[in-house]
Amino acid sequence: MVADAITFSRLYTIMVFRRFRWPIFFIIAATFLVALAPFSAQFMPSGNSIIPIKDHHHSSPSTVASTASIGGSHICPTTPPAPALTPDTQGRFDWRTIRKHNPIETYAQLPISNPSSRPAVQHTFVAASPRVKNEIASRKEAVREVFRRCWKSYKDRAWTKDELAPISGGARDAFGSWGATLVDSLDTLWIMDMEQEYAEAVEAAVDIDFGPKIDGEINVFETIIRYLGGFIGAYDVSGCHDARLLNKAVEVADMAYASFDTPNRMPVSRWSPKKAVDGEEQLPAESMLVAEAASASLEFTRLSQLTGDMRYFDAISRVTNVLEEQQGSTKLPGMWPISVNMRKPDLTFDGFFGLGAMADSVYEYLPKMHQLLNGIGPIGAQYQKMYEYAMSTAITHTLFRPMVHDKADILIAGANVNGQRDDKGQHLVCFAGGMFALGGRLFENSTHLDIGRKISDGCAWTYKNAPNGIMPEVFSMTACPTFSACDYTSEPGSSAFSDVGDGRYVLRPEAIESIFYMYRITGEVKYQDIAWDMFQAINTHTRTEFANAAIGDVMKTPVENYDSMESFWLAETLKYFYLIFSEPDKISLDNFVFNTEAHPFRIPHR
Ligand SMILES: *[C@@H]1O[C@H](CO)[C@@H](O)[C@H](O)[C@H]1NC(C)=O
């Protein structure tokens, strides 16, 4: 059993997905129109809607956009609406009407007492000199130009498809054919002040049909972080003025919520919408990835805050409680392994641990949940306790200081297999720099801030010392005996990596994400310079005729690109590059918390 689980885990690390991309998870029915027909009788009239659709038919889209952007005022609720809002499905399929097998009697409630005053996350910035300001502004403009170019090609060549193919100029569906890039990019368009494009994109996005047209399984996790996160992010950044976006968020969430209808209320991660609609009973898998099992917390909690509907918060609370109960009984107490059995549930059998692929957002969301909840009450404390326990284990058992020629004082987040540290780095795990820095601020722990800095600096170092200025997807480095002691001499000119297991760069955001957190948290302008070097290297080596494309092997010169541009390039990577060159109050880390797809959710302040 154990041996099997480890082989299983090892296999996955070789495969390196998005968080853990599966090649097969969305299978689209050629016959979806036929499949949809039997459900039309279940459509609910929209007369009971109490999420009002404001000005939808009467004002031009650009009016909606510009009214809200002037002055940036928001009308987001500070306490959850009571009674709860119910959505206007606009005549589309209503996921609330499907048969429930395991109904809930009492829902967990969001804590709503007054928050105590929270420590500030961001550095207190003083105004930059006009010269510096101009230089930074021109960098920001350069980022926006890259985004604009990609967006134009997406619009001209792949409109409403999941992805643009950036070399052939074609289109590709990879995430349910619901227009992943379209929804994922909404809040970036808003943030970059592309008002006309934003308005057009919202018009198209609110027409997407999340009804049960898909034959086969969907990856609920990817659906939640990209689509649900995308709609909530757009709704929140634009000030909660556009109810159409909240309605869409509810539509996606009500579909995802149906995947929690199991006997123990643990979710099904590879889930068939059609089977659920057909009334088939469903069971969570005996072996699933922990990130898929436990990463809906931020999205579902924010949606409960916005709608007053506690079903979402209740659903993720049950998963959090299982994580907490078993946190101390895993093979590496404090952390959860990559593979878990959610049917029992049993999170203790696998021996593969790490902050990276297939687990990452479980850890990332612990401090972020605390922040989104304003740290209130026993639930705020629960997330803090789980975070602190997990991180103290991760620090001791997964992080290492690499031997590098210039003796840089940096850290790499590796893995742990059966109690042995595995000194591999992944681009994806770079997010941990930002997570530790944020946690260090939220819980006033300077050790965490320091570790966050060293992990972020480790990612910056790896970019700078890779042949083309871009870090590979998976690599190995030689570890120093401890974080502080590292006495050795290395051959001048020797490679920074002892091995490169996967040389791709797939337009990932995690390195710039952490550099962005370090800039906003410490105020040190060197992070803007690091970001600029990274941006130039990435843009130079990924730019194609139409947009930007992934790299097959960053260790080769010249690099070769392949025909892929994942939606996170526009949703995350370019957003973080843009924000690090923006005024620090643009999406302040004291007012917003980012989901794992870089969608900013507003923290309700009273
Ligand atoms: C800060 O974090 C470290 C590492 O997890 C831990 O050992 C220490 O007790 C924490 N300090 C405080 C003040 O909580």
Image (tube, rainbow, N blue to C red):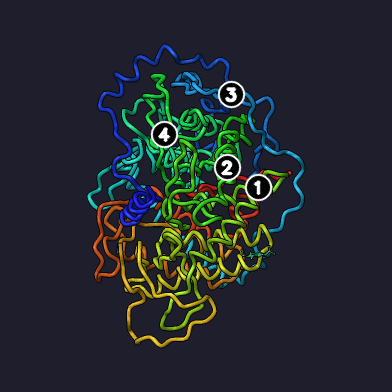
Circle 3 is placed at which residue position?
A: 86
Q: CA distance from mark 1 to mark 4?
A: 40 Å
The residue indicated by pointer 4 is 204
**Residue farthest to the top, as pictured:** 41
Q: Nearest to the eye among marks 3 and 4: give it.
A: 3
The answer to whether residue 332 is seen in the rendering is yes
Counting residues from the start of the chain, the first of labels 4 and 2 encountered is 4
Q: From the viewer's perspective, is residue 583 above or below residue 196?
A: below
Q: Any atom of ligand 1 within 8 Å of the CB at mark 2? A: no
The residue beneath circle 2 is: 320
Q: Is residue 365 above or below residue 494?
A: above
On screen, residue 342 above or below 143: above
Q: Amino acid at mark 2?
A: Thr
Q: Are marks 2 and 1 in contact (CB under 8 Å)?
A: yes
- Label 1 residue near ligand 1, CB within 8 Å: no
Q: Which residue is identified by label 1?
A: 382
Q: Looking at the image, can residue 248 be seen?
A: no
- Which quadrant does ligand 1 occupy? bottom right
Q: Residue 540, image x and y in percent?
A: 33, 66
User: Could you tell me which quadrant the C terminus lies in?
Assistant: top right
Of residue 181 and residue 333, the one placed in the foreground of this image is 333
